[in-house]
Amino acid sequence: PPPPPPPATTTSSASIATGSIGSAANTAAAGFPLGEQRYPYHNLEALVWGARLGGDRESAHAGANRMVALTEYTAFCRVGDASWYSEERFSVQQMLTFIYFEEWADLAALRTPPPPELLYTRAVWYFGRGMAAAHGHGGAAAE
């Protein structure tokens, strides 16, 4: 059976990316309770990318945080699989948002590397930390 819906979050999807490039359809779809959405990852990912492209840092982070929380809740990562259907792809959205907005100090603060079996997540972590180090955040040197 499918997992129960995740607990309510403090961030409403309906408010994410409404003022940016996010489409009204995806905003409306993401506004439904997560347990009632057919494609919650798709809806949130579209909003996060729309917010990033529109330069809406706050909405991008809010959506990325919600996507990561949903991924952690469902815990269905297929080890070593960053394919189109893998939740591992969605679990890195906060790191990708830090990279997109060049938030090097936030990347440098991510001290603990992901487990070795999460190949894609670990690659994004090393990339982000390397970019932070290249931009003067020496504490982020990619170990």
Image (tube, rainbow, N blue to C red):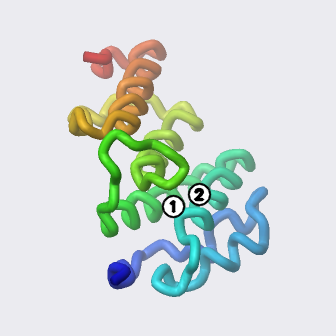
Whole-percent x, y for residue 19 in the image: 75, 64
Asked which quadrant contains residue 51, the reply is bottom right
Q: Is residue 47 above or below residue 129?
A: below
Identify residue type, mark 2: Glu
Q: Nearer the viewer, residue 81 or 71?
A: 81
Q: Nearer the viewer, mark 2 or mark 1?
A: 2
Q: Nearer the viewer, residue 25 or 98?
A: 25
Whole-percent x, y for residue 139 in the image: 28, 19
Is residue 131 visible in the rendered structure shown here? yes
Can you tell which mark lies on residue 45?
A: 2
Q: Which quadrant would the N terminus be assigned to in this image?
A: bottom left
Determine whether, in the image, residue 14 is placed left or right of residue 76. right
Q: Nearer the viewer, residue 103 or 4?
A: 4
User: Dot 1, crowdedness within 10 Å: few (<14), some or many (≥20)?
Assistant: many
Determine whether, in the image, residue 19 is placed left or right of residue 143. right
- Tag 1 residue: 62
Whole-percent x, y for residue 14 in the image: 62, 76
Is residue 7 visible in the rendered structure shown here? no
Q: Which quadrant would the C terminus be assigned to in this image?
A: top left
Asked which quadrant contains residue 65, the reply is bottom left
Can you tell which mark lies on residue 107?
A: none
Question: Considering only order in the chain, which callout, 1 or 2, is on the residue closer to the N terminus?
Answer: 2
Asked which quadrant contains residue 46, the reply is bottom right
Q: Helix, strand or loop at disc 2? A: helix
Q: CA distance from mark 2 to mark 1?
A: 11 Å
Whole-percent x, y for residue 18 in the image: 72, 68
Q: Helix, strand or loop at disc 1? A: helix
Determine the residue positioned at 40% across, 18% down: 130
Determine the residue positioned at 44% across, 41% down: 95
Identify residue type, mark 1: Ala
Q: Nearer the viewer, residue 123 or 57?
A: 123
